[in-house]
Structures are given as structure tokens and as C-alpha cells.
Amino acid sequence: MKFQIAHIITTLALASFSFAASFDAEGFGTSLNGWQKNRTASYAFTDAKYRTHFPTITYSPSGAMFLSTQVDLLADAGKGAICQIGLTFSSSGVLEGIQIKGSINNKALDTGLVRRPEAPAMAPAPAGGAAVTPPRPFHATDEMIAELFTRFDAEMKKVTEGKETMRSDLLSRLAGNNVKSADLSAGLRHNVNLMLQHVNG
């Protein structure tokens, strides 16, 4: 009897996860120049050098997926940036939340969790007419990414605030390397975009 109950529970668990989102980690690594033996991928992007770590994937009992990876901006003397990208997906593979945490010049950075926004409400239909559609197409994922990097840029300003050598460029130099804040933002966005492309609902 105990065996039958355990078998039923296992079957139900497997059935629930058959509908869960999945992530193609190998494909993600291939898009970043391939995983090395230490399970990192090293590559150049926007005139800067990066290292992305093999992602960690966990699931909730309901099948929601949490995906995270570390992205290092490489510079001499170890004075680069270390950032953690975290994404939460529904069981059907819809992005529900995204966040970046990091350490830049030994200072902490955190965008906070950006949650999926509500779709714009439809305008009330005129008497006898059809409902009026929103003035522009609404893409919630695009809205989330835009909000994430708006917050990221604001956090970067806080992290580098008061630095004489960084007033004109938030990360004008890291140990002699010309690495701009725009490069770091672009590198992280590149990773986010690739992660989203390799999620399967």
C-alpha cells in the first residue's frame, strides 16, 4: 500500500513537471563561445571581456522555474564587476520577475525585483461600438527589461557617486582598461536576451 501511494505521488509530480518551463543551458553556453571545463564561458562583447558562469536552475512545487547566472566583467588586478542575473518564470515559460545584483569596485548594487506589469486597461467601448484598443502594442517582457536597465543605470550612479575619475563616465577606467558603463549594461542585457531565447515553455 505504501509503495502504491509513493508511486502515485511520484507519477503526479512527474506529470506536473512535464508542463514546467525548461532552459537549454548547453545552447546558452554555445551562444557565448562555449562552456569551458570549469563551466564558464569567456567572450568579448562591446569592447569588453566577460565571463558567464553555468546557470543554476531550480523549480517550485508548482513548476515555476528560477534561473540565475553570474556574469563577470573582466579587468586587470581583479577590479572588474561581478553581477548576478536572476529570472523567474511561470510553469508555462512566461517571465514573471527579473533582478540584477552585483559588486562593482567593491560596492553593492541591487536593482530590486522587477515584476511583470499588468496590461493596459481597455478603454470603455462607445455605445454600440467596439472596444478601443490600447494606443500602442504592449509587450510586458520588453517593459520589464527596459525597467530593469533603467534601475541598473540608477544604481550605477549611486555606486560610483563622488568618484572624481568617473564623473564623465561611470566606469571610465577599471585598472587601466577602458570599460564604459554602457559596455557593462550592454553585456548584461546581452546575457538576459540570450537567456530568454533559450527558455522553453
Image (cartoon, rainbow, N blue to C red):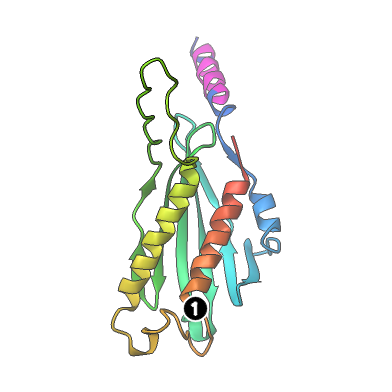
Left or right: 4 as drawn, with respect to 197: left
Left or right: 124 as drawn, with respect to 96: left
- All told, the count of numbered labels is 1
| Residue that carries the numbered disc 1 in the rendered image | 180
Left or right: 61 as drawn, with respect to 158: right
Residue 103, x across and y down, in percent: 39, 70
* Numbered range of the magenta stretch: 4-15
Q: Residue at x 51, y 32 (%)?
A: 91
Q: Going by the picture, which residue comes out furthest to the top?
A: 1
Three-letter residue code for mark 1: Lys
Left or right: 200 as drawn, with respect to 134: right
Which quadrant of the rendered structure holds the C terminus?
A: top right
Residue 193 can be seen in this image: yes
Q: Residue at x 68, y 64 (%)?
A: 37
Q: Going by the picture, which residue comes out furthest to the left?
A: 162
Q: Main secondary structure of the magenta part?
A: helix
Q: Residues within 10 Å of mark 1 (few under 14, many from 20)?
A: some
Residue 188 is a magenta residue: no
The part of the image, by quadrant, that contains residue 11 is top right
Residue 192, x across and y down, in percent: 54, 55
On screen, residue 134 above or below 51: above
Residue 77, x across and y down, in percent: 50, 86
